[in-house]
Image: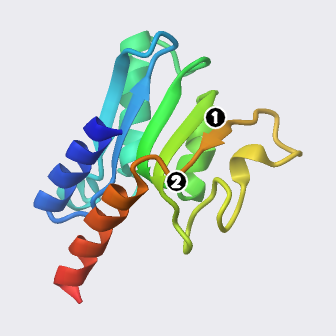
């Protein structure tokens, strides 16, 4: 999570919402990482999770990331939760919960829906105060 927080800080420096993500392989090694690049790339899908999942898939040579963990500073939105499911991620570890767009248990629970063909374990609240502080500081400066 500490590395994801560093990546989130980089997103804020680039003028984007401070969200960072890291994909850990089955053995705990970092195989992908990313931060929000929507503003830099002008791409609405360039969320930290998607960037990290793409890098992990390139690293492994497969879109199937079974046994991998996605560590992210903010609870994934529906798009990112869906991407994690499609990548067959086994676990999501998140920092701050997102009461507006969260899709891993707060607003929706996309990743554990009983109708889904793949379900993901969710561990929330890891370094939550640090992750929340980054977001509060970012938006506090803009409002």
Q: Kindly give the residue lying farthest to the left in the view shown.
A: 13
Q: Which of the image's four quarters has the C terminus? A: bottom left
Residue 49: quadrant of the picture: top left
> In x, y percent, where is residue 23?
42, 28
Residue 134: quadrant of the picture: bottom left
> In x, y percent, where is residue 31?
36, 19
Give the alpha-carbon distance from disc 2 to disc 1, as whole Å: 14 Å
The mark that comes first in sequence, 2 or 1, is: 2
**At 56% from the left edge and 54% from the top edge, which residue is drawn?**
79
Label 2: few (<14), some (14–19) or many (≥20) C-alpha neighbours in 10 Å: many
On residue 121, which mark appears?
none
What secondary structure is found at the residue carrying circle 1? Answer: helix
On residue 76, which mark appears?
2
> In x, y percent, where is residue 7?
23, 44
Q: Kindly give the residue lying farthest to the right in the view shown.
A: 115
Q: Horizontal placement of 73 versus 93: left or right? A: left
Label 1: few (<14), some (14–19) or many (≥20) C-alpha neighbours in 10 Å: some
**At 17% from the left edge and 81% from the top edge, which residue is drawn?**
141
Q: Which of the image's four quarters has the N terminus? A: top left
Q: Disc 1 designates what residue?
A: 86
What secondary structure is found at the residue carrying circle 2? Answer: loop
> In x, y percent, where is residue 133?
29, 66
Q: Does residue 70 sit above or below 25 in this rendering? A: below
Q: Do the numbered discs 2 and 1 sit on residues whose CB atoms are within 8 Å?
A: no
**At 47% from the left edge and 9% from the top edge, which residue is drawn?**
27
| Front position in the image: 58 or 76 | 76
| Front position in the image: 126 or 20 | 126
Q: Does residue 102 sit above or below 114 in this rendering? A: below
Task: State which mark lies toward you, 2 or 1.
Answer: 2
Q: Does residue 10 sit above or below 13 in this rendering? A: above
């Amino acid at each position: 999570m500490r590395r994801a927080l560093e990546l989130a800080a980089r997103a804020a420096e680039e003028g984007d919402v401070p969200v960072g993500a890291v994909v850990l392989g089955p053995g705990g090694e970092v195989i992908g990482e990313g931060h929000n690049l929507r503003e830099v790339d002008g791409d609405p899908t360039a969320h930290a999770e998607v960037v990290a999942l793409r890098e992990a898939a390139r690293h492994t040579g497969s879109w199937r990331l079974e046994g991998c963990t996605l560590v992210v500073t903010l609870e994934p939105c529906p798009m990112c939760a869906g991407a994690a499911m499609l990548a067959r991620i086994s676990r999501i570890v998140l920092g701050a919960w997102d009461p507006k767009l969260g899709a891993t248990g707060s607003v929706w629970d996309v990743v554990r829906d009983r109708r889904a063909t793949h379900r993901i374990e969710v561990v929330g609240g890891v370094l939550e105060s640090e992750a929340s502080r980054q977001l509060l500081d970012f938006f506090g400066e803009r409002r």
